Image (tube, rainbow, N blue to C red):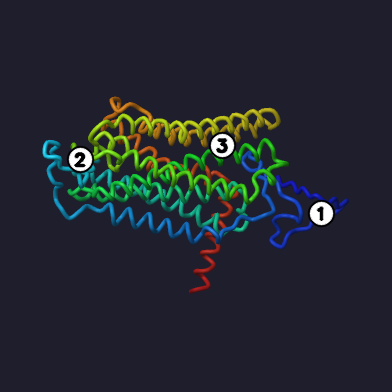
């Protein structure tokens, strides 16, 4: 259903079409898709202003992950002994080192498939939201940034794990571990905040459709995305400092497939309780606060739909909200287990599954849950494939 609202009354006349046939002048368009009301503002979102920077950041993240996280030339790190005050210059990522060769080969094939699917699906969403002029609403603006964050987040950890599944040398330098941890912090914190903003965007679109264009204007959406990125960058610096503030003179074996902050802090010398307390307090702000906003937004969405939607509309809305909340719960609970649980309850068998859940499973599920179940995104994908086939036919 498509309803055109215009500030100028035209009795017995159809609203004039825009040059693209999308939105009439001085108005906005409300579309209903999968029981969600989408209000598309007149102003389109700037694509060129952040496209080059986004591509540059993606290339930089991929380069850092592949080059800096490759195994070092030395076969084993130097011996570490607190009695002679020697310090750690390398870490050993244990990962799946103790698994059999056949198990590692199976894991390599599985994780390579999941990584390829996540990169392909998120890359397709980024391309469509950048190039399709019909997908210029705030929802798709946020989806494009979410996919870009997922690409950055998954690229900081999975390529390194794939390399270590096929080689025997699992050492990483001290600097490489610091860089990886900062990128994980930056992308993870930014995604936590962006998911909360996306839930608020859906709440405004469904519960306040007439004011949606004014509340979620172009400037507001750009500022919200910028705030998510800025907070991720600044928060990453704080967490990085708290993770490496103490010297390292203990065992340098990290019982995971990437440099995870709580495990690295446990290897440091001196009292690590203060660092863990700061990370715990930061996790409350970064994880619990956005999750509370997400749950509150979807609760109000459901209450609003129950009061006015038909039985079929309610079913679609329940299905959509349940799928969104499922991904959110997976992402936040796994991160909470890693950063808000006492270290005494952790172990290699417990840390790895939760780390895999929020580093590879969630980035792969986000495109399916948020985009591929959407009719407008499906139509945009069909148009993109048609344009690609037409271009290939013309080139031949």
List the residue tagged with mark 1: 14
Q: Which residue is mark 2?
A: 252
Q: Which residue is mark 3?
A: 320
**On the picture, is 359 further left or further right than 42?**
left
Relative to 68, does residue 224 appear above or below in the rendering?
Answer: above
Q: What percent of the width, then of the height, locates residue 221? A: 59, 48
Above or below, 58 relative to 161: below
* Percent x, y of residue 175: 28, 50
- Label 3 CA crowd tier, 10 Å (few <14, some 14–19, many 20+): some
User: For numbered disc 2, what is the local secondary structure?
Assistant: loop
For the residues marked 1 and 2, what is the alpha-carbon distance in whole angstroms? Answer: 72 Å
The secondary element bearing badge 1 is classed as loop
- Frontmost residue, 289 versus 388: 289
> For numbered disc 3, what is the local secondary structure?
helix
Task: Bin the neighbour count of mark 1 within 10 Å (Cα to Cα): few under 14, some 14-19, many 20 and up.
Answer: few
Residue pushed farthest bottom? 396
Q: Are marks 2 and 3 in contact (CB under 8 Å)?
A: no
CA distance separating discs 3 and 1: 33 Å
Crowd band around label 2 with a 10 angstrom C-alpha radius: few (<14), some (14–19), many (20+): many
In this picture, residue 124 sits left or right of residue 246: right
Q: What residue is drawn where x is 14% and y is 51%?
A: 75
């Amino acid at each position: 259903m498509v309803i055109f609202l215009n500030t100028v009354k035209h009795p017995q006349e159809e609203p004039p079409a825009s040059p693209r046939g999308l939105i009439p002048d001085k108005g906005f368009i409300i579309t209903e898709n999968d029981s969600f009301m989408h209000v598309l503002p007149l102003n389109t979102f700037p694509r060129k202003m952040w496209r080059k920077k986004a591509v540059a950041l993606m290339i930089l993240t991929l380069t850092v992950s592949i080059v800096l996280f490759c195994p070092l030339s030395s076969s084993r790190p130097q011996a570490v002994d607190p009695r002679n005050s020697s310090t750690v210059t390398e870490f050993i990522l244990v990962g799946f080192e103790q698994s059999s060769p056949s198990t590692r080969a199976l894991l390599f094939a599985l994780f390579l498939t999941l990584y390829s699917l996540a990169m392909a699906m998120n890359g397709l969403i980024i391309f469509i939201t950048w190039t399709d002029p019909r997908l210029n609403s705030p929802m798709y603006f946020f989806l494009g940034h979410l996919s870009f964050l997922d690409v950055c987040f998954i690229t900081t950890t999975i390529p390194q794990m794939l390399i270590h599944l096929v080689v025997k040398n699992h050492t990483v330098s001290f600097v490489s571990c610091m860089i990886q941890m900062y990128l994980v912090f930056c992308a993870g914190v930014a995604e936590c905040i962006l998911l909360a903003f996306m839930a608020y965007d859906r709440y405004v679109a469904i519960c306040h459709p007439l004011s949606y264009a004014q509340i979620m204007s172009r400037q507001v959406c750009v500022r919200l995305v910028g705030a998510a990125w800025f907070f991720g960058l600044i928060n990453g610096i704080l967490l990085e400092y708290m993770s490496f503030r103490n010297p390292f003179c203990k065992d340098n074996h990290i019982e995971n497939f990437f440099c995870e902050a709580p495990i690295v802090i446990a290897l440091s010398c001196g009292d690590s309780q203060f660092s863990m307390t700061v990370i715990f307090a930061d996790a409350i702000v970064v994880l619990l606060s956005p999750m509370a906003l997400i749950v509150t937004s979807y609760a109000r969405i459901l209450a609003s739909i129950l009061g006015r939607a038909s039985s079929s509309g309610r079913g679609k809305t329940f299905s959509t909200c349940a799928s969104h909340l499922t991904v959110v719960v997976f992402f936040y609970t796994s991160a909470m287990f890693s950063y808000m649980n006492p270290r005494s309850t952790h172990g290699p068998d417990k840390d790895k599954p939760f780390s895999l859940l929020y580093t590879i499973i969630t980035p792969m599920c986000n495109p399916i849950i948020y985009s591929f179940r959407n009719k407008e995104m499906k139509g945009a994908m069909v148009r993109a494939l048609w344009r690609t086939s037409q271009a290939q036919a013309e080139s031949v």
